[in-house]
């Protein structure tokens, strides 16, 4: 229905005012905005979502399920067959249920980690970057410096977190970490 009759969306000022109102209302009930789109009382944050935001592993089971699995030498993303009928036919024939698999490049690892972890208002400890990507934090040093210079995040060598400006303009912040691609001409 939304495709045929898209609703009128608020402009940037209205959206910011709505966000402020939501944050004030939830704060008055002891909820805090711990992640871009999540609120919780202290100590009751979603462990399931925190695993995603901190680039943890997960195993998808069932039609259309996705997985992220870390090995000593690589990180793999997988997608199971999407359509239940096709998935069941493959399962009954003892065939692989994986429709697509991708080994993440180092550049992809850095970007995907930042794309998730920078959703957290409190950011993350720099040691988690190495633990989850297998890369030193210096792999994204240039991008960290640029984001900090633009006022989108703060970085003290122990913790990286988005500023209020970085949270409001998260897409701009994440764009800094996009892997560079070359365009064949």
Image: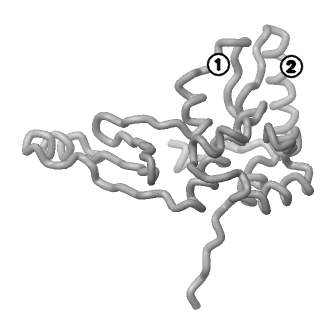
Residue occupying image coordinates x 64% and y 19%: 45
Give percent across and percent down for residue 176.
75, 60
* Residue at the image point whose x is 29% and y is 35% from the top: 62
Kindly check if marks 1 and 2 are in contact, taking CB atoms under 8 A apart as contact: no
In the rendered view, does 52 fall on the left or right side of 90?
right
Determine which residue is flagged by label 1: 45
In which quadrant will I find the C terminus? bottom right
Residue found at x 39% / y 42%: 66
Which of the 4 image quarters holds residue 39? top right
34 relative to 107 in the view: left or right = right
Tag of residue 24? 2
Q: x and y percent of residue 183 in the render?
A: 60, 82
Query: What residue is shown at x 79% (from left), y 37% (from top)?
Result: 159
Please, what secondary structure does the residue beneath circle 1 have? loop
Q: 87 or 77: nearer the eye?
A: 77
In depth, the one of 97 and 139 nearer the eye is 139
Q: Earlier in the sequence, mark 1 or mark 2?
A: 2
Residue furthest left as drawn:
93
Query: How packed is label 1: few (under 14 Cα within 10 Å), some, or many (20 or more)?
Result: some
Where on the picture, by quarter, is residue 54? top right
User: How far from the left and from the top, in percent, is residue 140?
Assistant: 72, 57
Q: Can residue 32 be seen at all in this image of the molecule?
A: yes
Badge 2 marks a residue whose secondary structure is helix
Q: Nearer the viewer, mark 1 or mark 2?
A: 1
Q: Residues within 10 Å of mark 2 (few under 14, many from 20)?
A: some
Q: CA distance from mark 1 to mark 2?
A: 18 Å
For residue 80, above or below residue 19: below
- Residue 161 visible? The answer is no
The answer to whether 1 is drawn above or below residue 29 in the figure is: below
**What colour scheme governs how the chains and residues are painted in the rendered image of this protein?**
one colour
The quadrant where residue 150 appears: bottom right
């Amino acid at each position: 229905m939304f495709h045929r009759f898209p609703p009128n969306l608020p402009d940037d000022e209205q959206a910011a005012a709505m966000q402020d109102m939501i944050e004030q209302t939830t704060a008055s009930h002891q909820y805090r905005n711990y992640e871009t789109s999540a609120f919780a009382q202290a100590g009751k944050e979603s462990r399931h979502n925190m695993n995603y935001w901190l680039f943890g592993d997960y195993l998808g089971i069932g039609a259309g399920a996705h997985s992220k699995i870390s090995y000593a030498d690589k990180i793999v993303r997988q997608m199971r067959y999407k359509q239940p009928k096709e998935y069941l036919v493959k399962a009954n024939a003892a065939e692989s249920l994986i429709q697509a698999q991708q080994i993440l490049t180092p550049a992809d690892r850095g970007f995907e980690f930042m794309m998730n972890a920078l959703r957290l208002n409190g950011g993350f400890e720099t040691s988690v970057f190495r633990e989850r990507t297998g890369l030193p934090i210096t792999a994204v040093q240039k991008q960290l410096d640029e984001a900090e210079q633009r006022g989108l995040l703060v970085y003290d060598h122990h913790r990286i977190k988005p500023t209020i400006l970085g949270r409001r303009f998260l897409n701009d912040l994440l764009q800094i970490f996009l892997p560079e691609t070359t365009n064949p001409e």
